[in-house]
Amino acid sequence: MANTYIVDKDGNQIDASTATIPADRHFRNAWSLSGSVISEDMTAAKAIFQDKIREVRAPLLAAEDVVYMKALEADDSDAKSASVTKKAALRDAPAASAISNASDIAALKAAWDTSVLGDSPYA
């Protein structure tokens, strides 16, 4: 029977049967190998998390552009202001301090702002 190998973000590999593997696989591309212990590289995990925010916010920004255009056509200053505020929050989401301050994967996953981005893909 062939062995199964695990490869970390740097290309290092070990036999999976000898490894201590994190239970959470959301940040698998941030795994780092030290001996037979695999842990998450928080810098890489944060970059993955920010990329996921960018992926999720793209259609939200496009939808908000429509809202803004309708408000512009209706000359509704309150709706325009609300739309500008929402778009700013979406643009700022990847730079949230909760992301940079996260010290572990649980804290990073908790940094998902559901009020801006909707349901977390990490739930």
Image (tube, rainbow, N blue to C red):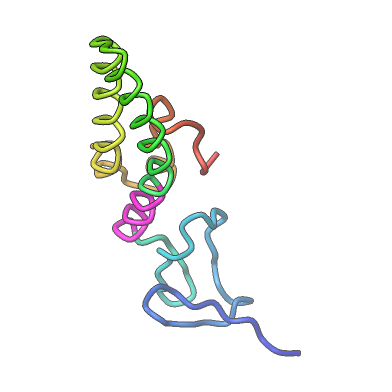
Figure disc tally: 0
Q: Tell which residue pokes out farthest to the front in this image.
A: 73
Q: Which of 90 and 34 lies nearest the eye of the viewer?
A: 90
> Which residue is drawn at the image coordinates 52% and 82% (left, top)?
14
> Which residue is drawn at the image coordinates 23% and 42% (left, top)?
95
Q: Quadrant of the C terminus?
A: top right
> Which residue is drawn at the image coordinates 25% and 41% (left, top)?
101
Q: Position of residue 48 (x, y in %)?
A: 38, 56
Q: Which of 102 and 67 lies nearest the eye of the viewer?
A: 67
Q: Position of residue 25 (x, y in %)?
A: 54, 57
Q: Is residue 7 left or right of residue 78?
A: right
**Is 5 covered by the magenta stretch?**
no
Residue 13 vs 86, above or below: the answer is: below
The residue segment tinted magenta is 42-52
Dominant SS type (magenta): helix
**Is 47 covered by the magenta stretch?**
yes
Residue 80, image quadrant: top left
Residue 94 vs 3, above or below: the answer is: above
Residue 10, image quadrant: bottom left
Q: Which of 111 and 105 lies nearest the eye of the viewer?
A: 111
Q: Which of 24 and 74 lies nearest the eye of the viewer?
A: 74
Q: Tell which residue pokes out farthest to the bottom in this image.
A: 1
Q: Position of residue 90 (x, y in %)?
A: 31, 34
Residue 98 vs 17, above or below: the answer is: above
Q: Is residue 97 left or right of residue 6?
A: left
Q: Quadrant of the N terminus?
A: bottom right
> Which residue is drawn at the image coordinates 29% and 37% (left, top)?
93
Q: Position of residue 57 (x, y in %)?
A: 38, 40
